[in-house]
Image (cartoon, rainbow, N blue to C red):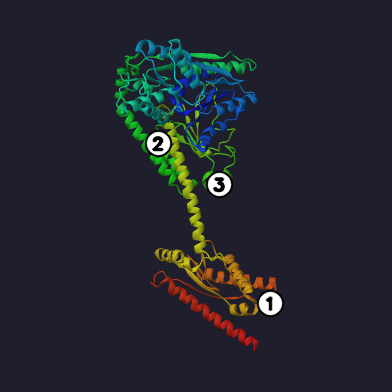
């Protein structure tokens, strides 16, 4: 029992998507289906690696896990991706509805761009006497952009007018290229046209704003129109004359069509084209179909509340960035985020998740393609699981369980939004919002929220890698390269704090001075290689005899110091005996031409005295030297 429908969409079309989802939910509820929305924020102006990272969120979905697929093919900002998704679903035997592009093997729901656009152009010509139009399209070759351009041409020709080739531009559905078109056309020999006809409202708003900055009054000096009838266009002054589409109806019909395919896989419903209609507003010089003054008044009543909301979300995003980037390790990151979301989730809703491939943070591989395997192929650790307003500890997520711990209940429908976490083209996780998240109601907040998390993760990865490199450098600086023991440079850093801490808690420290016997003879007679061997064997003896937390130091060429906190006479004697026994075994087992032995002198500090650490080391050295002297005297007597 799947009871899941996958929707592939683009988050920059949030308003349109939310309208469509309203209709989708209504239809999906009839068959008790959850809706999984895979949301990319890819744009035509993205760098290639960033765009791939956004589009990779669609690879998170395993087609066969869904009863059907809906692709907002005209909104993905990648026609190639839309076609690939449709082909993959078809290979898996999963029915697909494509909204916007007529893709082979899918049920197609299109938009009658021509009806609304031709009606708008007719109005401009017959009511406002427009003769010269500058058309600003979306991306070159995009199905909707091409259809809207064709409608403009056809309506102009029906009135005996033409659209000159030099008056056709493509601005990739976005602001900056549109502004450049406005600047260029105004400065050209032909100058200001009668009207700028834009293929969407975003470009129309950018055009109107730029014209205002240049001193022109839209609706009087020049006309600007759009397409989509988004709320921002209605609130703008002058409100944007545009074309309206009933996306709620489109969403409703999309699921109905999909369910027909599920019930009858071999049936392909006829392509369905949804009407569009012109919406006459103020940017063409008319008073408009709606009372736009009332629309703006209602918005203004909420304006301060909206400002507070925006400021609050900005504050939360800053907190998240600081919290993530400032974490010491994965465990502290998880603890900090869980504590945050347990208290603060007003905009995220009662259910919110962050999953992550821990290798992104914990691998020291400089190249991410070596640290992260493929696209969402590895297990995703559940970094945050907010369920019903409470933090839960849930197992990792994978392609079998995209929503950690979630089990569908009959009669309950949920909508999940999956947003990618990526570093360039390398995807290391995703966030999940649900249909209750207020972030979805506030324009593009979900993108900027997710972006802040990504920036925090990138900074944290950088910090962790720098810390690791610094630790390695510190290790190299503090450690004797031959023995791996701490060197004299580390004395001030580690030994002195240990000594001072023992004074604070009135505990005793053992300081043992160790010196290899007859080291000069070993070097002179058997060579320096054997001398090095003796040093390494003594090192092994020391390491095998001390406890964790003790400080072994190579103090000089053949001199060693061991500093042991919370020590006793018994421990000191035991260590001394252990070192001697270890070397006796080495001499016995290896059968070398020479014997390796050491002289050890130790002292125990008195926390009630003011003696310095160096005083104790000198005393341990003196005791060691006395033992060494006695050893040499004894050896001399035995040779006589």
From the top left corner, tell me how far across and down residue 94 is, in percent: 62, 23
Label annotation for residue 132: none
From the viewer's perspective, is the residue at label 2 or at label 1 nearer?
1
Quadrant housing residue 123: top left
**Of callouts 2 and 1, the N-terminal one:** 2
Quadrant housing residue 520: bottom right
For the point 48% across and 22% down, the residue is: 145
Quadrant (top left/top right/bottom left/bottom right) for the C terminus: bottom right
Give the Cα distance between marks 1 and 3.
Answer: 51 Å
From the viewer's perspective, is the residue at label 1 or at label 3 nearer?
3
Circle 2 sits in a helix, a strand or a loop, which is it? loop
- Tally of numbered tags: 3
**Of callouts 3 and 2, the N-terminal one:** 2
Give the Cα distance between marks 3 and 2.
Answer: 35 Å
Residue that label 2 marks? 344
Residue that label 3 marks? 367
Give the Cα distance between marks 2 and 1.
Answer: 73 Å
Circle 1 sits in a helix, a strand or a loop, which is it? loop
Residue that label 1 marks? 593
């Amino acid at each position: 029992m799947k009871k899941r429908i996958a929707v592939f969409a683009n988050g920059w079309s949030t308003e349109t998507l939310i309208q469509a989802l309203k209709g989708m939910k209504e239809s999906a509820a009839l068959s008790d289906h959850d809706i999984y929305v895979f949301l990319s924020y890819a744009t035509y102006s993205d760098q290639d690696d960033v765009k791939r990272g956004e589009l990779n969120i669609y690879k998170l979905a395993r087609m066969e896990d869904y009863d059907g697929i809906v692709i907002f093919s005209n909104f993905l900002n990648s026609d190639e991706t839309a076609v690939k998704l449709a082909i993959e679903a078809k290979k898996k035997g999963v029915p697909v509805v494509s909204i916007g592009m007529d893709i082979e093997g899918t049920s197609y729901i299109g938009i009658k761009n021509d009806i609304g656009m031709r009606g708008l152009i007719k109005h401009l010509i017959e009511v406002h006497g427009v003769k010269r139009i500058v058309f600003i399209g979306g991306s070159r070759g995009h199905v909707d952009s091409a259809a809207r351009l064709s409608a403009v041409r056809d309506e102009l020709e029906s009135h005996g007018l033409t659209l000159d080739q030099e008056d056709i531009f493509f601005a990739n559905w976005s602001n900056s290229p549109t502004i450049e078109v406005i600047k260029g056309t105004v400065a050209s020999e032909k100058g200001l046209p009668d009207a700028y006809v834009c293929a969407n409202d975003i470009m129309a708003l950018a055009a109107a704003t730029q014209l205002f900055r240049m001193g022109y009054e839209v609706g009087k000096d020049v006309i600007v129109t759009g397409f989509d009838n988004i709320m921002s266009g209605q609130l703008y002054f002058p409100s944007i004359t545009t074309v309206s589409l009933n996306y709620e109806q489109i969403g409703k019909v999309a699921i109905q069509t999909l369910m027909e395919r599920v019930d009858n896989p071999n049936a392909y419903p006829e392509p369905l084209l949804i009407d569009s209609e012109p919406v006459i507003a103020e940017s063409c010089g008319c008073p408009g179909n709606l009372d736009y003054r009332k629309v703006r008044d209602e918005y203004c009543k909420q304006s301060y509340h909206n400002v507070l909301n925006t400021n609050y979300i900005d504050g939360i995003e800053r907190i998240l960035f600081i919290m993530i980037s400032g974490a010491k390790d994965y465990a502290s990151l998880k603890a900090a985020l869980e504590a945050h979301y347990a208290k603060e989730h007003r905009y995220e809703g009662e259910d919110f998740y962050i999953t992550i491939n821990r290798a992104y943070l914990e691998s020291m591989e400089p190249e991410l393609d070596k640290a992260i395997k493929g696209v969402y192929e590895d297990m995703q650790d559940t970094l945050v699981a907010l369920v019903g307003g409470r933090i839960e500890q849930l197992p990792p997520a994978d392609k079998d369980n995209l929503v950690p711990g979630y089990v569908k209940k009959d009669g309950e429908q949920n909508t999940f939004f999956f947003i990618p976490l990526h570093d360039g083209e390398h995807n290391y996780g995703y966030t999940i919002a649900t249909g209750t998240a207020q972030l979805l109601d506030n324009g593009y907040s979900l993108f900027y929220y997710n972006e802040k998390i990504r920036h925090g993760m990138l900074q944290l990865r950088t910090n962790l890698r720098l810390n690791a490199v610094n630790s390695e450098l510190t290790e190299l600086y503090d450690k004797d390269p031959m023995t791996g023991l701490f060197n004299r440079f580390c004395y001030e850093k580690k030994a002195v704090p240990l000594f001072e801490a023992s004074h604070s808690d009135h505990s005793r420290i053992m300081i043992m001075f160790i010196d290899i016997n007859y080291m000069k003879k070993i070097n002179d007679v058997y060579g320096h290689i054997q001398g090095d061997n003796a040093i390494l064997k003594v090192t092994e003896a020391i390491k095998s005899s001390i406890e964790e937390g003790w400080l072994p130091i190579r103090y000089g060429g053949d001199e060693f110091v061991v500093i042991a906190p919370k020590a006793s006479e018994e421990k000191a004697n035991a260590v001394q005996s252990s070192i001697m026994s270890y070397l006796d075994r080495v001499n016995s087992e290896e059968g070398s031409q020479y014997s390796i032995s050491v002289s050890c002198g130790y002292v125990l500090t008195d926390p009630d005295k003011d003696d310095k650490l160096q005083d104790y080391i000198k005393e341990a050295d003196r005791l060691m030297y006395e033992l060494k002297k006695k050893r040499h005297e004894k050896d001399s007597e035995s040779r006589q």
